[in-house]
């Protein structure tokens, strides 16, 4: 239960390897502070003698070639517009390096570190992918095919059509006669990517939907039956699927859609709901500003609080079940004072047992957290970059200004109400 990331620094053809058991969760936050602050922080983590395959992401900083290669599978970058603004920030934070993402995952990352033919190092798409269009269908997708019983509430229905916190796939079909059909799926399924027989018919069976807002589209695809054209766009993981689509849809002109969301909207002569640069930045800036370290201690802290709350309620219910009959018995037998003393004793014993159990659980969590730390030193800083909130905010604003982007003050009103780190407040 960890998200390990490796940090490799290459100088004079010599590699130094560092490992942090939890840095893979928000690796994109750690990289944004540049090479010096990243290396200073990495040196406080666990140094390794060599490469390890037990990782989920990482970065290779090659000072000899002035190259930085990184890999991290983070859901906050699943929307292409968000990934684009992050890439601009990252390249500006590493001005003396050619920054590249490891498209083939850990295999590319290992190669950048000079690891030849690493055993078992290959990209492993751990994210579940639906096999068929039917499996990828979003619940309620067919609602617009049903009799419209609530036409007066059409505007409200449109607002509820999409979950604005769930990233989805958007598919447009241009029929032979030019008819436009819009479909939304949980993701692009295997049969669609492979061009399986009958997949277009399966798509057409789904209900017509509205054009989704850009802020929740992680992948897009349009199929022009008349022209025999397919265009694909989306996050980095979707770009890896392009070759697969080209091989599966033999006889079709399959290309990457550089115009992405606006171009797909134009097929229907619509503008859609574009995502502004500020809105895209608001998805990632809160995490960049945070100095919270996501680790097992944080998880156990939340679980411990929830467990304690549940235990208190359970103990209270148990005491009620025990004490009420005792009170009734004392009243009936006219021995109420004696029963009151007995109830007091039971209550004291319950408190002692509860506190002892709480101590044992906390001790167990503490030991588990120590073991999971993988040898990280107590001197380890929680995250790279400034730890003072004001200084961190100021440095990030400088970086944003260098990229010609809005300042933190301008972005802050657009921060989402919830983000992953807020779950642990």
Image (tube, rainbow, N blue to C red):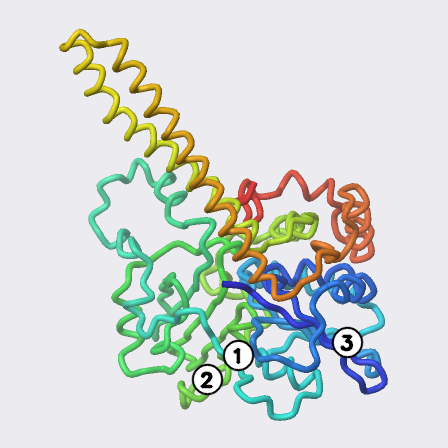
Q: Earlier in the sequence, mark 3 or mark 1?
A: 3
Mark 3–mark 1 distance (CA, rounded to whole Å): 27 Å
The residue at the point 53 percent across, 73 percent down is 237
Residue 375 locus on image (x, y percent) = 65, 65
Q: What is the tally of numbered marks visible in this picture?
A: 3
Q: Earlier in the sequence, mark 3 or mark 2?
A: 3
Residue 172 locus on image (x, y percent) = 41, 67
Mark 3–mark 2 distance (CA, rounded to whole Å): 34 Å
Residue occupying the far top of the picture: 334
Marks 1 and 2: in contact by CB < 8 Å? yes
Q: Residues within 10 Å of mark 1 (few under 14, many from 20)?
A: few
Q: Nearer the viewer, residue 235 or 5?
A: 5
Q: Is residue 147 visible?
A: yes
> Image check: 78 left or right of 70?
left
Residue 31 locus on image (x, y percent) = 72, 63
> Image check: 144 left or right of 171?
left
- The relative height of residue 169 versus residue 346 in the rendered view (above or below) is below
Q: Nearer the viewer, residue 168 or 10?
A: 10
Q: Nearer the viewer, residue 29 or 302?
A: 302
Which residue in the protein does label 2 denote? 244
Which residue in the protein does label 3 denote? 9
Mark 2–mark 1 distance (CA, rounded to whole Å): 8 Å
Q: Quadrant of residue 70?
A: bottom right
Helix, strand or loop status at disc 3: strand
- The relative height of residue 161 versus residue 62 in the rendered view (above or below) is above
The residue at the point 48 percent across, 82 percent down is 254
Tell which tag, 3 or 1, sits nearer the viewer.
3
Q: Please tell me the numbered disc located at residue 258.
A: none
Residue occupying the far bottom of the picture: 117
Which residue in the protein does label 1 denote? 240
Q: Quadrant of residue 179?
A: bottom left
Residue 287 locus on image (x, y percent) = 64, 51
């Amino acid at each position: 239960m960890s998200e390990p990331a490796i940090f490799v620094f290459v100088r004079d053809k010599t590699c130094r390897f560092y490992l942090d058991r939890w840095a893979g969760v928000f690796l994109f936050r750690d990289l944004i502070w540049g090479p010096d602050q990243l290396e200073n922080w990495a040196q406080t983590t666990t140094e390794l003698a060599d490469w390890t395959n037990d990782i989920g992401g990482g970065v290779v900083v090659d000072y000899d070639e002035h190259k930085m290669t990184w890999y991290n599978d983070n859901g906050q970058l699943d929307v292409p517009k968000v990934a684009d603004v992050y890439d601009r920030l990252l390249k500006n934070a590493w001005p003396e390096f050619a920054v590249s993402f490891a498209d083939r995952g850990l295999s590319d990352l290992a190669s950048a570190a000079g690891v030849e033919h690493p055993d078992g190092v290959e990209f492993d798409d751990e994210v579940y992918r639906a096999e068929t269009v039917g499996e990828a269908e979003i619940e309620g997708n067919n609602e617009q095919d049903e009799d419209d019983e609530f036409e007066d509430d059409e505007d409200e229905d449109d607002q509820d059509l999409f979950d604005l916190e769930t990233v989805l796939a958007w598919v447009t079909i241009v029929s032979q006669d030019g008819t436009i059909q819009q479909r939304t799926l949980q993701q692009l399924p295997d049969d669609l990517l492979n061009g399986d027989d009958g997949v277009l018919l399966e798509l057409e069976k789904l209900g017509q939907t509205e054009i989704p807002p850009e802020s929740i589209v992680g992948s897009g695809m349009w199929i022009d039956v008349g022209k025999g054209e397919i265009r694909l766009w989306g996050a980095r993981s979707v770009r890896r699927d392009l070759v697969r689509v080209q091989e599966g849809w033999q006889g079709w002109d399959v290309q990457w859609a550089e115009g992405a969301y606006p171009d797909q909207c134009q097929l229907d002569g619509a503008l859609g709901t574009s995502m502004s640069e500020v809105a895209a930045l608001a998805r990632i800036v809160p995490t960049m500003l945070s100095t919270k370290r996501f680790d097992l201690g944080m998880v156990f802290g939340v679980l411990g609080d929830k467990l304690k709350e549940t235990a208190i309620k359970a103990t209270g219910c148990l005491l009620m079940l025990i004490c009420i009959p005792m009170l009734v018995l004392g009243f009936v037998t006219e021995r109420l004072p004696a029963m009151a003393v007995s109830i007091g004793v039971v209550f004291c014993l319950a408190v002692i047992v509860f506190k002892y159990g709480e101590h044992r659980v906390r001790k167990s969590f503490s030991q588990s957290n120590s073991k999971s730390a993988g040898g990280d030193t107590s001197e380890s800083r929680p995250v790279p970059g400034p730890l003072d909130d004001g200084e961190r905010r100021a440095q990030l604003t400088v970086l944003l200004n260098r990229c010609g982007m809005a300042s933190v003050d301008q972005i802050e009103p657009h921060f989402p109400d919830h983000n992953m780190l807020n779950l642990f407040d």
